[in-house]
Amino acid sequence: MTGSLDGKVAFISGTGGGIGRAGAIRFAAAGASVVGCDADVSSAAQTQALVTAAGGTMVTVAPVDLGDYGDCRRWIEEGLAAYGRIDILWNNASSGVFATIESMTPSDWERSIRNELTLVFLATKAAWSQLATDGGLIMNTASVAAHGGSVAGIAHSATKWGVRGMTHVMAAEGAPLGIRAVSISPGVIETPGSSAQLAQPGVTEALMARSLVPRLGQPDDVAAFAAFLASDDASFATGADFRVDGGLINR
Ligand SMILES: NC(=O)c1ccc[n+]([C@@H]2O[C@H](COP(=O)([O-])OP(=O)(O)OC[C@H]3O[C@@H](n4cnc5c(N)ncnc54)[C@H](O)[C@@H]3O)[C@@H](O)[C@H]2O)c1
């Protein structure tokens, strides 16, 4: 059986987390060789074990701090040493601070910008020349927060609107080089990253009331869509954002 990503090399950041893990499993099952990375060594190693146990091909570079350009370069260089090319760079990792304007400190703000916005630029910059050589795709994870804004999302919305904006620039500058760029905007997905928010009383019920699809999103909802975007079937798509949000912001 042939997979939709056979022969492709996919760099996925944040493979220790919910969506990154599902992405690594889904992409490897579709035939890609995956280069994962994460700040968290243990969860990244668990993902690697799941992929290889299922017969997939994957290497992991961890720990890396993608807010540091040297670490971004190390991730890219070690992945290239393993598989030699970059067909897909999925900038999935991020970690933000959720707080109201009144309670967010300037250092929380700086931390969010670094770990939700700057890391996308730095990893892309580290991979750019190889992406141009290989005609690769950049996929950035934005959010429904990049289509609006809600309480305690001042930094998160700022960074995710920024990710969408950067995606347009990457598509424009990348086009003459054969690089495409798209972003994905997930809705509420059950992951380690969202568990604290979803555990707050009434939050899940309130979200369900707004969603057209009556359930919380699962990591594989995003991973499956990303695998399609990364396949040759999506080769006419660039400079666009795709919402995978159960219709959350339609209501
Ligand atoms: N879960 C949701 O509801 C949701 C909704 C919209 C968008 N998103 C976006 O989807 C992406 C994945 O989210 P998730 O819910 O799977 O999160 P998660 O917290 O489960 O996983 C994120 C992973 O990224 C890693 N990471 C964070 N900062 C890093 C850094 N500087 N260097 C290296 N690794 C780093 C973390 O260690 C973690 O393993 C994020 O971009 C997030 O903003 C998530």
Image: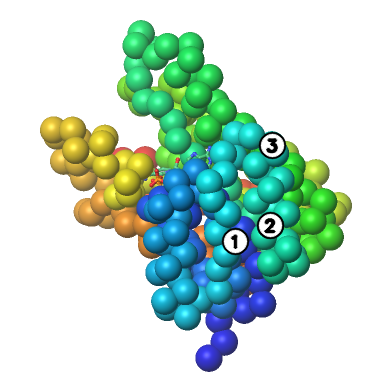
Q: Quadrant of ligand 1?
A: top left
Q: Nearer the viewer, residue 88 or 250?
A: 88
Q: Are marks 1 and 2 in contact (CB under 8 Å)?
A: yes
Kindly report the distance in space between the C-alpha atoms of the residues bearing marks 1 and 3: 17 Å
Closer-to-camera residue (182/39):
39
Q: Earlier in the sequence, mark 1 or mark 3?
A: 1
Closer to the observer: label 2 or label 3?
2
Amino acid type assigned to the residue bearing label 1 in the image: Val
Q: Position of residue 10 (x, y in %)?
A: 62, 63
What is the distance, in whole Å, between disc 2 and disc 3 at their CAs?
14 Å
Q: Secondary structure at mark 2?
A: helix
Numbered disc in front, either 1 or 2: 2
Q: Which residue appears at 62% of the width and 79% of the height?
A: 6
Residue 56 visible in the displayed image: yes
Q: At which x and y percent is residue 19?
A: 42, 54
**Label drawn at residue 35:** 1
Res. 238 visible in picture: no
Q: Which residue is mark 2?
A: 78
Instruction: Name which of mark 2 and mark 3 comes first in the sequence.
Output: 3
> For the point 58% across and 48% down, which residue is it?
91
Horizontally, residue 216 falls left or right of residue 26, namely left
Q: Is residue 233 left or right of residue 56?
A: right
Numbered circles on residues, count: 3
Question: Can you say whether 134 is above or below 193 in the image?
Answer: below
Q: Is residue 131 left or right of residue 202?
A: right
Task: Kindly indicate the quadrant of the structure image that contains residue 144.
Answer: top left
Label 3 sits on residue: 69
Could you tell which of marks 1 and 2 lies nearer the N-terminus? 1
| Residue count near mark 2 (Cα–Cα under 10 Å), binned few <14, some 14–19, many ≥20 | some
Which amino acid lies under the numbered mark 3 shown in the image of this protein?
A: Tyr
